[in-house]
Image (spheres, rainbow, N blue to C red):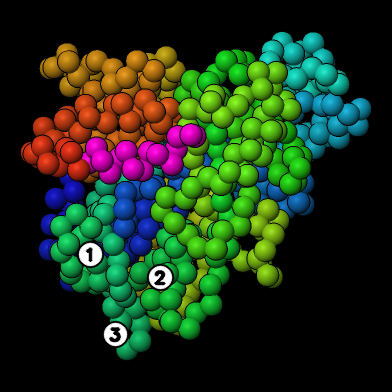
C-alpha cells in the first residue's frame, strides 16, 4: 500500500469514481470497504491520518451498550450486540472477549444489575460471549484483588468485546485497498464541485506537498464525524449545525493498579456516566467523561476537571489510589453526537446513527460508534448507490474477513495484532536482525514495525507510527517521546528524507505528545 501510487490513481482517474468518501475514521473506512466489495470504484480522502480523530481515541470496547439498555434503547442494543458478534468473527486478531465485573456496594445492586445483564445476554442470543452471573464477595475479590473492599457485597460478571481501534482502522484501509479502493491520507477536501446544483466531485489539497486538484465522482459521502458540519456548510452555507461534539477523556495507568484479568464497570458515577477500568496492552485504561465542547479540534485536550473526576472515581474503587504521577498517558476524543432538541445534555443523546441526503445529492452519515460501523456503512452505501444511479449490488461485509484475519492468536507475541501480516514482519527481522530489537524497554514495539508501517500502512509521520500504527503515545507518552529520534531515523532511511526532516518531525511530535503527559 503506497501513497504515491494511490495519489497517481486518484489523479489519473479524476474523470470519475463511483463513490467518493470524505473522512478516514471508522465510518468512512467502513463505507470504503462496503463500496469497494460491491464492485464500485471507490475513493476515500482523509485530511490528516486515518483514524487521527475520534476513531483512535475510544474506550477500546466493542460493546452492545449496557447503558443504552438503561436508557431503554433496546433496538440500538440489539443492533450493537449483533455487530459485536460479527466483528469478533471477522477480525479475531484484533477483537477478543473481555470479562467485566460490576462491583456491588448496596444490597439492591446485585439483583438489579444481575437481572439487567441477563436481559443483555438474552438480547445477544447465539452471538453472546458468555453468560453473566452473580459473584460472591470472595469470588469478586479473587478476580479483582485491588478493588476497594469497604462495603463490598459481591459483584456481577458479564462479557463484552475489546479491540485496538486504530489498528482496526488500518486493517480496514488495507481491506478496502485489497478490493481495489483508492485511499489517501493527508488529502484535504477544500470544496465541493457541482453541476446543475448537484454535487459531482471535490477539490482537494495535498497536505504534504500543497498540490491542489479536482476529482469527480457520481456521489460524495460526508463521513467526517465531528467535522460533519464543515462539509454540510461547504454544500449549503445556510445549513444549521447538526453535531453536538462531546469530549471523552481516558487516563492510562500501570497494570499493578488492577492486576486481574477482568475489567471493572461502575454503572453510575457522579455525573450519571458509566466508568470503566479496562486492561489493554499491558496497561489499564480508565474513563470516560462526557463534556460538551463548542467546536471540534483534531487534537482535543483533557481539561483539569476531567482528569480530577477520573482520578477521584478510580481512587474510590481501587485500593492503590492512583494519582497524577501514576498516569502514563491522558488522551481525549470527541464523540460526533447528532443533536436532539437543544443538544445540551450530551450524555443523554442517542448513539444511533443518522443518514441524510441533501438537495444537492450529498450523502451524510453521522453519529454511531465503532461497534456499529459496518451496519452504518451498509446503510450509507445502499443510499449512495441509489443517489448515484449505480447498479444495485448486495452488501457482502457481514461475513467479510478483515485484512490480517487470523484465529488463535498468541497474545504474548509482540506482533499478535498484525494477524497474518506478522509473518511478513518476521521476514523483515530475519533479513535484518537489528529490526527485531525493541524501540523502548517499557513498551513492546519493535523497530521492524516502523519499517512495516512506512512500506505497507501509509505511515507518513512519526506521529502516525507512535500514535496509530503502534499505540506508544497512548500507553506511555514519555517513553514514546524517548523513542521518537530512532523512529525518525528509521522512517527517514525508508523514505529517503534528510536530517532537516528528522529534526522537524521530532519537534512536531514532541509538541503533540505534550498534551498526553500530565505535568
Q: Are marks 1 and 3 in contact (CB under 8 Å)?
A: no
Dot in front, 1 or 3: 1
Our reading of the magenta stretch's main secondary structure is helix
Which residue is under mark 1?
A: 205
Give the answer, above or below, for where 216 lies relative to 396.
below
Quick one: 31 or 271, which is closer to the camera? 271
Q: Residues within 10 Å of mark 1 (few under 14, many from 20)?
A: some
Give the answer, above or below, for where 216 lies relative to 504.
below
Which residue is under mark 2?
A: 231
The residue shown at (15%, 64%) is 211
Q: Give the range drawn in magenta.
A: 505-519
Q: Do the residues labelled 1 and 2 touch (CB within 8 Å)?
A: no
Residue 305 location (% of width, % of height): 63, 44
The residue shown at (69%, 13%) is 145
> How far apart, in angstroms, are the residues tagged by discs 1 and 3?
21 Å
Under circle 1, the secondary element is strand
Dot in front, 2 or 3: 2
> How far apart, in angstroms, are the residues tagged by discs 2 and 3?
17 Å
Which residue is under mark 3?
A: 195
Quick one: label 1 or label 3, which is nearer the N terminus?
3
Q: Quadrant of residue 407?
A: top left
Q: Residue furthest front?
A: 519
**Along the horizontal axis of the image, is 480 left or right of 97?**
left
Residue 48 location (% of width, % of height): 31, 53
Quick one: label 2 or label 3, which is nearer the N terminus?
3
Under circle 2, the secondary element is helix
**Along the horizontal axis of the image, is 254 left or right of 69?**
left
Quick one: 96 or 323, which is closer to the camera? 323
**Can the viewer see residue 389?**
no
Q: Which residue lies furthest to the right in this view?
A: 107
Residue 146 location (% of width, % of height): 68, 15
> How far apart, in angstroms, are the residues tagged by discs 1 and 2?
15 Å
Amino acid at each position: 500500500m503506497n501513497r504515491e501510487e494511490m495519489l497517481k490513481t486518484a489523479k489519473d482517474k479524476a474523470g470519475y469514481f463511483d463513490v467518493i468518501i470524505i473522512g478516514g475514521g471508522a465510518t468512512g473506512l467502513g463505507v470504503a470497504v462496503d463500496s469497494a466489495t460491491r464492485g464500485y470504484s471507490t475513493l476515500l480522502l482523509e485530511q490528516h491520518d486515518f483514524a487521527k480523530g475520534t476513531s483512535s481515541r475510544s474506550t477500546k470496547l466493542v460493546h452492545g451498550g449496557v447503558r443504552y439498555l438503561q436508557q431503554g434503547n433496546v433496538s440500538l442494543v440489539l443492533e450493537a450486540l449483533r455487530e459485536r458478534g460479527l466483528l469478533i468473527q471477522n477480525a479475531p486478531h484484533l477483537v477478543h472477549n473481555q470479562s467485566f465485573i460490576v462491583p456491588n456496594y448496596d444490597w439492591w445492586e446485585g439483583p438489579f444489575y444481575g437481572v439487567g445483564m441477563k436481559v443483555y445476554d438474552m438480547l445477544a442470543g447465539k452471538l453472546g460471549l458468555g453468560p453473566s452471573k452473580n459473584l460472591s464477595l470472595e469470588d469478586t475479590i479473587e478476580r479483582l484483588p485491588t478493588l476497594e473492599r469497604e462495603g463490598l457485597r459481591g459483584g456481577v460478571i458479564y462479557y463484552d468485546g475489546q479491540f485496538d481501534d486504530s489498528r482496526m482502522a488500518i486493517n480496514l484501509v488495507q481491506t478496502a485497498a485489497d478490493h481495489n479502493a483508492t485511499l489517501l491520507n493527508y488529502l484535504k477536501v477544500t470544496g465541493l464541485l457541482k453541476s446543475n446544483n448537484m454535487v459531482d466531485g471535490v477539490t482537494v489539497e495535498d497536505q504534504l506537498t500543497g498540490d491542489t486538484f479536482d476529482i469527480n465522482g457520481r456521489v460524495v459521502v460526508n463521513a467526517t464525524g465531528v467535522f460533519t458540519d464543515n462539509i454540510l456548510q461547504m454544500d449549503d452555507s445556510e445549513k444549521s449545525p447538526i453535531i453536538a461534539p462531546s469530549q471523552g477523556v481516558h487516563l492510562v495507568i500501570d497494570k499493578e493498579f488492577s492486576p486481574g484479568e477482568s475489567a471493572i464497570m461502575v454503572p453510575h458515577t457522579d455525573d450519571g456516566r458509566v466508568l470503566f477500568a479496562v486492561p489493554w496492552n499491558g496497561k489499564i485504561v480508565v474513563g470516560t467523561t462526557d463534556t460538551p465542547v463548542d467546536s471540534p479540534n483534531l487534537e482535543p485536550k483533557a481539561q483539569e476537571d476531567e482528569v480530577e473526576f477520573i482520578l477521584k472515581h478510580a481512587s474510590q474503587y481501587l485500593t492503590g489510589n492512583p494519582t497524577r504521577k501514576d498516569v502514563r498517558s491522558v488522551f481525549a476524543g470527541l464523540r460526533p453526537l447528532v443533536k436532539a432538541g437543544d443538544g445540551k445534555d450530551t450524555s443523554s443523546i442517542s448513539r444511533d446513527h443518522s443518514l441524510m441526503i441533501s438537495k444537492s445529492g450529498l450523502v451524510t452519515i453521522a453519529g454511531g460508534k465503532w461497534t456499529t460501523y459496518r451496519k452504518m456503512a451498509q446503510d450509507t452505501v445502499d443510499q449512495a448507490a441509489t443517489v448515484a444511479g449505480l447498479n444495485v449490488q448486495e452488501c457482502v461485509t457481514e461475513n467479510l474477513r478483515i485484512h490480517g484475519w487470523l484465529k488463535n492468536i498468541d497474545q504474548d507475541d509482540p506482533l499478535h495484532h498484525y494477524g497474518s501480516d506478522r509473518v511478513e514482519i518476521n521476514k523483515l527481522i530475519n533479513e535484518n536482525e537489528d529490526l527485531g530489537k525493541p524501540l523502548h524497554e517499557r513498551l513492546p514495539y519493535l523497530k521492524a514495525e516502523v519499517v512495516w508501517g512506512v512500506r505497507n500502512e501509509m505511515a507518513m509521520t512519526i506521529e502516525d507510527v507512535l500514535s496509530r500504527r503502534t499505540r506508544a503515545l497512548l500507553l506511555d507518552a514519555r517513553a514514546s517521546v524517548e523513542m521518537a529520534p530512532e523512529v525518525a531515523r528509521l522512517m527517514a532511511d525508508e523514505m529517503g528524507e534528510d536530517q532537516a526532516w528528522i529534526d522537524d518531525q521530532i519537534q512536531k511530535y514532541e509538541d503533540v505528545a505534550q498534551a498526553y503527559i500530565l505535568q
